[in-house]
């Protein structure tokens, strides 16, 4: 996995998200805009956590590196699959809600992994 490539993907996801949010009509899509803003915020959290996991990956060995790689791949897969779609307001809103919930679960999962690795490898936090 190329670490630099992941950083570019996360950055592009944030930029694309901002651009897409500008296209949503104001009158009927305030909920969509709020959901998209929330997703953008949590994507920033995801980037911070993945950056920390990438740094932590170099300080652990074996199965712990494999765990980090799997979770980083899951984050990259979510980012590349996220594409707000839908013909109607209801479809777009439902999609954004499901993606927000999936993203929150992913952030929680990565945070727990980071915490467990840091707790089991105190020297890795230095």
Image (cartoon, rainbow, N blue to C red):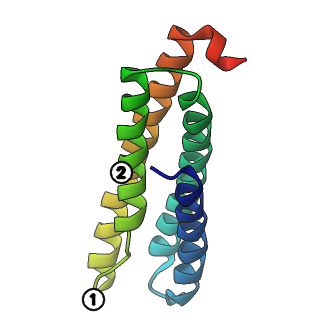
Q: Nearer the viewer, residue 37 or 110?
A: 110
Q: Dividing the picture into quarters, in which one does residue 65 lie?
A: top left
Image vertical order of residue 94 relative to residue 24, above or below: above
Q: Which residue sits at x=45%, y=35%? A: 110
Left or right of 33 in this view: 85: left
Residue 91 percent location from the top left of the image: 26, 77
Q: Dividing the picture into quarters, in which one does residue 125 lie?
A: top right
Residue 29 percent location from the top left of the image: 46, 81
Write down the residue under mark 1: 87
Quick one: label 2 or label 1, which is nearer the N terminus? 1
Image vertical order of residue 102 relative to residue 31, above or below: above
Residue 71 percent location from the top left of the image: 38, 39
Q: Dividing the picture into quarters, in which one does residue 100 lie?
A: bottom left
Q: Which residue sits at x=35%, y=39%? A: 70
Q: Which residue sits at x=32%, y=80%? A: 85
Alpha carbons under labels 2 and 1: distance apart: 21 Å
Write down the residue under mark 2: 101
- Mark 1 Cα shell of 10 Å, populated few (<14), some (14-19), many (≥20): few
Q: Which residue sits at x=58%, y=82%? A: 19
């Amino acid at each position: 996995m190329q670490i630099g490539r992941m950083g570019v993907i996360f950055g592009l996801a944030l930029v694309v998200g901002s651009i897409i949010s500008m296209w949503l009509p104001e009158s009927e899509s305030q909920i969509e805009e709020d959901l998209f803003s929330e997703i953008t915020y949590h994507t920033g959290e995801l980037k911070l956590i993945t950056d920390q996991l990438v740094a932590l990956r170099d300080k652990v060995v074996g199965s712990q590196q494999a765990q980090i790689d799997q979770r980083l791949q899951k984050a990259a897969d979510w980012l590349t699959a996220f594409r707000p779609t839908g013909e109607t307001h209801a479809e777009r809103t439902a999609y954004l809600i499901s993606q927000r919930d999936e993203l929150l679960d992913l952030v929680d999962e990565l945070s727990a992994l980071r915490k467990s690795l840091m707790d089991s490898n105190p020297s890795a936090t230095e």
